[in-house]
């Protein structure tokens, strides 16, 4: 992690028994791993679990003391594969990534791991990026758990429960020789709370012991006949063992209530939302005291038949609050009760939406609907005042319909990726539109205004692969694909570049190299320019690309040079040379660059050193309020303001002081022949004597000429 | 169910902010404030990739530890706001406040809305070809109507004045509103505990606190500088225009613009060109909408932006002063200004005397020579003697403008337009108004200007088809709207086919 320090978080990892830990959920998990005596942790960054990777990346000292190895993995498959260390040895290990995209990439290793079974506890921590704020396809990790028979924990979203789940997860894994997946939703990862810490544990059996006394068991290798054995083992031994452990240790929770003829079953992660819904409906207090019996599944796979049978006894109906689809739990419970011949009605997706996040409002409405059907007597009548209030609110909302515009994420101020798409826009004007296959990363913002560039995104590092079929010998155009440096090293070198070379692709590929895994928080990569004592950086993308056989490669080391960017792209699209054309567009991520240089510059200015700061501006007199400059940029610091000209109505373009002087505005004005309104203001701090002398002379001359201009103006009037 | 504690409910606070603008800092301050004031604080958010300038929401719940102790149990706090169940909504910008209203988070029975009224314009507002801004008054009205109590003022301006960020002012406004049962020192301690930019944040906090407690100080209306006097030589001519104050402001502004742009004679031409329009209005009695719009458009058309004009504007002393203010130049700092100019052969020919200009555009070899020098843009350092002199000399060509190629062309097109306006007015006044407005499509430089001109010509062509049809004015307005829908003019083309 180059430009951010997590010293404060690392300090929290050192808390001892009895001390209070305060912080985010995902950091609590990190601490819990050390308390559980892990030997190794592997992970690939991505919201909402980046923090775990970032903090451990900065925690080398603590990790060394405990003998823990931390792998900042190349991708999720590599992270999951690392868990192989727990197959033969009593080593506790954890892998973490974003779900479901990470689980997709990891599933090859996960399936093999689950088949082999584990001796040491293996925990997979997935940040379920679902619902508001999510940046990926809306799917469930649940399916992955079921298909490979990996147990799935979904604890209540408070720190003590989450920490408990980590401890129990390792024990469950060891008790059933099965890897365990811990699912945490976005808000649970970011929830700020507290728990009472325990001492960190240094494992007795170490990775060193394993390396020096290797242990081989052919029955743990996924190859016939063992693979058949594994399947039978899963059903005959591991599953029953897991069920026993979950029941005996009461991992799932039951809460009694006086309305005993109904009940609500929920994923642990849904608990707080359900409780608030009940509290608003007057059926629970703020301390979780509910009138309706609750069954909280902190383990959502496997389900415990006996517990369901017990919970449903004497109930005419239960409501299952299960976020996401398909409704695996609801389906399974139907089977369980049918087999046990229990007549309790099972409600779920019939009362709650089949798709979409289960927000407070959604759950409240679902629970109300359920109660209206089965226990209307419990519901307080809706007062008239509430109804009129609802009307009033609706009326106000109507009054601004269409006025409130979406504000999706976009490129940061001064982002070096913006000029790449500005250049693509200019090429589009000359050569017409092209098919553009996008990838994963900040550059995917190109699909939104103002650029509106991009047709598909098929996954991380798959930009060029996503364009591979659109390659035609006699077509007048070539497809363009985008891959970021993150995606390039994650999977792109093989799946996009190698694939294009081998299949003699004739398409164009732009590698956006901003020096970081920027969208996930600015982590270092193989090609990062920064020195990182713990990692190997500065490995050239160009060498890698040439190494797998690309001959047409152009490296542009200043993406802000829009003219050059445009011409290079045009050349790539028109050159007669066969084979893939790769343009490597390198400029440092501005967010991280500012984190790095701001403090330095501030210090230099304080120390009286000469520092020149550039920023851009627009002359209101010459700006005609057409905003084509914004349509080619969209930079947050390039905005609009009321027109000071009494004769004009359109707002003028304005550059606000957040401008970092990246230079794009000027370059675009030049390349697109826009207008003469842009100026660059260079502010010289602590000028030298020579600067001051020059300034004095020119001010004298210019001042004299300007006085002449004014005299003439007066004469004219 | 424990009736002693059922009444105690958590205080719910939603913070709506724009990624990277300090919403997280504010949420942290509130959490720290609460934890040191006898509350249990739970804060959560869904930042993820929305941190990249997108709309983000932070949600907090505060619960009195005493109540938890009394009950002997921990409260179960929610991780997301439930519409109708939010006590305080804090919005760092006006449209985010309106978004909270749209999401139903602000309700008249309980929500205190604390919002900054400044605008951070959304992408579509910024990229519009003309004016795509949302209606601020509508947004503010809706916020006021939705909230039980609203504290709203321009906190961004206040933050800038105190050299801090909007989140500190919002935090101050939260304290000043008195909606939380906590005292000012506790808030300030929370800022101190964070340890970064403390002094600046405290100043901004104080400003926000007082504004919220005493009601925001009305921003003093910036004194409008008295308009420069109209050259006496034009008095008699100007006296013919006994029109409404609004129309008169535009006429006067036009006159001054053109004296400044060329000379007295040019301004006289302006008034003479307006005379027939004035007579059309006069004939209809107290209606001078056509004059007002034509006066505005004519002044802009006659003061078209050519290289001479641009050079003149760039080298003015007022401009140097304005730039210094805009970049907040401090003592001991030196400012250098570089212009990004890209005059092409066309613009150069435009500035030359008509004959030479035409020759240049016609003569292949000459054009190629000039093309070579104008292929890429130039940056001219106006604050260097050389750069300033260059622009000074171009500006000095002003007297020759009347003989330039562009001048002839512009005057012809202006007269054609005015002619259309008058002729149309004779048959359909409202349509004529639309024709007058239409001239506004022609603006800007290079391709932008050419594109606008093309759209104008296309619309002018279909005027004859329009003029005698019912709702002609409305139809033209629709075409105008279509013309502003995209750069390519595609929408306009389709709209004209549907005509």
Image: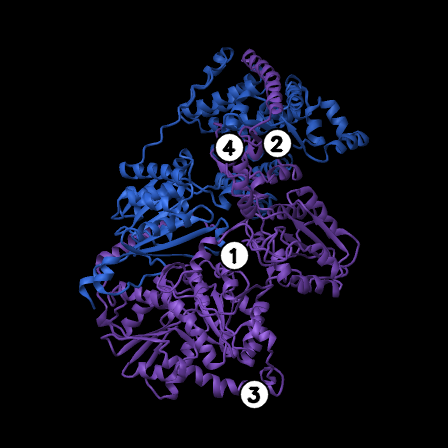
Chain colours: A purple, B blue
Q: Are marks 4 and 1 on the same chain?
A: no
Front label number (2 vs 1): 1
Q: Which residue is mark 2?
A: A676
Real-space Cα distance between discs 2 and 1? 48 Å
A464 shown above or below A306:
above
Image marks 3 and 1: residues in contact by CB distance under 8 Å: no
| Image position of A601 (left or right of A292) | right
Q: Which residue is mark 3?
A: A229
Q: Which residue is mark 1?
A: A58
SS assignment at label 2: loop
- Looking at the image, tell me whether mark 3 or mark 1 is earlier in sequence order: 1
Q: Chain of mark 4?
A: B
What percent of the width, then of the height, locates residue B186? 29, 45
Real-space Cα distance between discs 4 and 2? 33 Å
Identify the image quadrant of residue A26: bottom left
B470 shown above or below A191:
above
SS assignment at label 3: helix
- Looking at the image, tell me whether mark 2 or mark 3 is earlier in sequence order: 3
- Looking at the image, tell me whether mark 2 or mark 1 is earlier in sequence order: 1
Identify the image quadrant of residue B44: bottom left
Q: Which residue is mark 4?
A: B432
Front label number (2 vs 3): 3
What percent of the width, then of the height, locates residue A481? 66, 57
Real-space Cα distance between discs 4 and 1? 71 Å
Which quadrant of the rendered structure holds the N terminus of chain A?
bottom right
Instruction: Residue at 47%, 77% (x, y): give it.
Output: A173
Front label number (3 vs 1): 1
């Amino acid at each position: 992690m180059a430009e951010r320090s997590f010293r404060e978080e690392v300090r929290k990892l050192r808390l001892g028994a009895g001390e209070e830990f305060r912080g985010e959920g995902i950091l609590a998990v990190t601490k819990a791993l050390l308390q559980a005596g892990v030997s190794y942790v592997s992970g690939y960054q991505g919201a909402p679990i980046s923090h775990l990777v970032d903090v451990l990346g900065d925690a080398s000292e603590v990790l060394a003391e405990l003998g823990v190895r931390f792998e900042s993995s190349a991708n999720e498959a590599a992270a999951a594969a690392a868990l192989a260390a727990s197959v033969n040895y009593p080593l506790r290990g954890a892998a973490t990534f974003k779900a479901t995209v990470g689980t997709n990439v990891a599933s090859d290793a996960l399936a093999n791991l689950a088949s082999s079974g584990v001796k040491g506890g293996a925990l997979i921590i997935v940040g379920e990026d679902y619902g508001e704020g999510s940046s990926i396809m809306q799917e469930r990790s649940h399916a992955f758990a079921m298909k490979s028979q990996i147990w799935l924990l979904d604890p209540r979203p408070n720190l003590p429960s989450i920490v408990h789940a980590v401890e129990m997860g390792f024990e469950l894994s060891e008790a059933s020789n099965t890897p365990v997946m811990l699912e945490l939703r976005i808000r649970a990862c970011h929830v700020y709370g507290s728990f009472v810490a325990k001492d960190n544990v240094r494992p007795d059996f170490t990775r060193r012991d394993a390396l020096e006394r290797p242990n081989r068991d052919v029955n743990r290798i996924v190859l016939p006949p063992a693979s058949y054995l594994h399947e039978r083992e899963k059903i005959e031994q591991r599953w029953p063992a897991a069920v026993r452990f979950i029941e005996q240790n009461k991992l799932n929770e039951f809460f009694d209530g006086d309305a005993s003829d109904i009940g609500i079953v929920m994923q642990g992660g849904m608990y707080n939302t359900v409780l608030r819904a009940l509290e608003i409906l007057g059926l629970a207090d703020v301390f979780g005291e509910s009138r309706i019996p609750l069954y909280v599944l902190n383990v959502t796979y496997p389900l415990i038949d006996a517990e369901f049978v017990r919970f449903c006894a004497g109930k005419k109906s239960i409501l299952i609050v299960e976020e996401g689809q398909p409704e695996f739990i609801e389906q399974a419970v139907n089977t369980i009760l049918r087999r046990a011949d229990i007549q309790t009605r099972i409600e779920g997706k019939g009362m709650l939406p089949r798709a979409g996040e289960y927000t407070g409002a959604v759950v409240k409405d679902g629970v109300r609907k359920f109660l209206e059907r089965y226990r209307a007597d419990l519901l307080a009548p809706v007062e008239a005042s509430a109804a009129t209030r609802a009307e009033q609110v609706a009326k106000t909302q109507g009054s601004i319909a269409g006025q409130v515009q979406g504000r999706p994420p976009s490129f940061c101020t001064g982002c070096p990726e913006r000029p790449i798409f500005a250049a693509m826009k200019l090429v589009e004007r000359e050569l017409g539109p092209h098919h553009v296959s996008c990838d994963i990363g900040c550059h995917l913002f190109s699909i939104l205004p103002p650029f509106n560039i991009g047709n598909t995104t098929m996954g991380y590092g798959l930009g060029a692969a996503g364009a591979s079929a659109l390659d035609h010998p006699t077509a007048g155009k070539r497809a363009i694909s985008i891959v970021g440096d993150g995606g390039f090293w994650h999977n792109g070198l093989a799946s996009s570049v190698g694939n294009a070379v081998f299949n003699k692709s004739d398409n164009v590929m732009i590698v956006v190299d901003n020096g970081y895994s920027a969208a996930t928080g600015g982590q270092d990569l193989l090609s990062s320019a920064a020195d990182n004592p713990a990692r190997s950086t500065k490995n050239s993308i160009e060498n890698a690309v040439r190494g797998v056989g690309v001959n047409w490669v152009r490296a542009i080391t200043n993406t802000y040079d829009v003219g050059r960017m445009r011409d290079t792209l045009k050349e790539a699209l028109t050159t007669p040379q066969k084979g893939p054309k790769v343009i490597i567009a390198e400029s440092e991520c501005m967010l991280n660059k500012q984190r790095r240089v701001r403090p330095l510059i501030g210090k230099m200015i304080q120390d009286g050193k000469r520092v020149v700061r550039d920023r851009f501006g627009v002359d209101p007199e010459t700006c005609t309020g057409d905003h084509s400059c914004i349509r080619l940029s969209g930079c947050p610091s390039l905005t609009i303001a009321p027109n000071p000209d009494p004769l004009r109505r359109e707002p003028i373009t304005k550059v606000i002081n957040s401008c970092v002087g990246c230079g794009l505005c000027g370059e675009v004005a030049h390349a697109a022949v826009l207008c003469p309104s842009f100026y660059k203001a260079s502010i010289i701090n602590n000028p030298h004597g020579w600067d001051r002398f020059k300034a004095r002379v020119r001010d004298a001359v210019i001042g004299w000429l300007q006085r002449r201009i004014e005299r003439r103006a007066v004469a004219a009037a | 169910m424990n009736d002693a504690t059922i009444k105690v409910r958590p205080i719910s606070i939603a913070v709506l902010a724009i990624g990277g603008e300090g919403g997280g800092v504010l949420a942290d301050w509130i959490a720290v404030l609460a934890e040191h004031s006898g509350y249990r604080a739970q804060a959560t958010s869904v930042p993820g990739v929305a941190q990249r300038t997108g709309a983000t929401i932070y949600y907090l719940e505060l619960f009195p530890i005493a109540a938890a102790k009394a009950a002997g149990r921990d409260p179960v706090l929610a991780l997301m706001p439930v519409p109708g169940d939010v006590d305080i909504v804090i919005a760092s910008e006006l449209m985010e406040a309106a978004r909270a209203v749209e999401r139903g988070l602000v309700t008249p029975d309980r929500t205190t809305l604390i919002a900054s009224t400044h605008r951070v314009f959304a992408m579509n507002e910024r990229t519009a070809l003309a004016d795509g801004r949302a209606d601020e008054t509508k947004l503010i009205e809706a916020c006021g109507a939705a909230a039980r109590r609203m504290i709203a003022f321009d906190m961004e301006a206040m933050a800038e004045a105190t050299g801090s960020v909007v989140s500190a002012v919002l935090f101050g406004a939260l304290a000043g509103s008195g909606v939380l049962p906590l005292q000012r020192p506790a808030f300030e301690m929370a800022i101190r505990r964070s340890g970064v930019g403390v002094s600046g944040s405290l100043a901004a906090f104080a400003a926000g606190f007082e504004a919220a407690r005493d009601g925001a100080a009305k921003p003093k209306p910036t004194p409008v500088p008295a308009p420069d006097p109209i050259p006496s030589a034009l008095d008699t001519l100007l006296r013919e225009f006994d029109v409404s104050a609004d129309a008169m402001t535009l006429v006067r502004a036009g006159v001054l613009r053109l004296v400044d742009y060329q000379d007295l004679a040019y301004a006289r031409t302006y008034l003479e060109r307006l005379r027939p329009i004035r007579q059309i209005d006069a004939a209809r009695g107290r209606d001078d909408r056509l004059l007002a719009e034509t006066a505005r458009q004519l002044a802009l058309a006659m003061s078209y932006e050519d290289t001479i004009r641009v050079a003149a504007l760039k080298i003015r002393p007022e401009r140097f002063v304005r730039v210094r203010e805009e970049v907040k130049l401090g003592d001991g700092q030196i400012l250098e200004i570089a212009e990004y100019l890209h005059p092409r052969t066309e613009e150069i020919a435009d500035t030359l005397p008509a004959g030479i200009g035409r020759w240049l555009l016609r003569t292949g070899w000459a054009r190629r020579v000039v093309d070579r020098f104008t292929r890429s843009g130039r940056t001219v350092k106006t604050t260097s003697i050389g750069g300033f002199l260059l622009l000074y000399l171009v500006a000095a060509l002003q007297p020759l403008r009347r003989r330039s190629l562009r001048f002839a062309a512009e005057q012809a097109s202006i007269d054609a337009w005015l002619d259309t306006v008058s002729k149309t007015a004779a048959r359909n006044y409202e349509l004529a108004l639309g024709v007058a407005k239409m001239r506004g499509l022609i603006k800007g430089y290079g391709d932008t200007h050419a594109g606008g001109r093309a759209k104008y010509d296309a619309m002018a062509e279909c005027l004859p088809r329009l003029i005698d049809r019912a709702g002609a004015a409305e139809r033209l307005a629709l075409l105008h709207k279509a013309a502003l829908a995209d750069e390519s003019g595609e929408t306009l083309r389709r709209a004209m086919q549907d005509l």
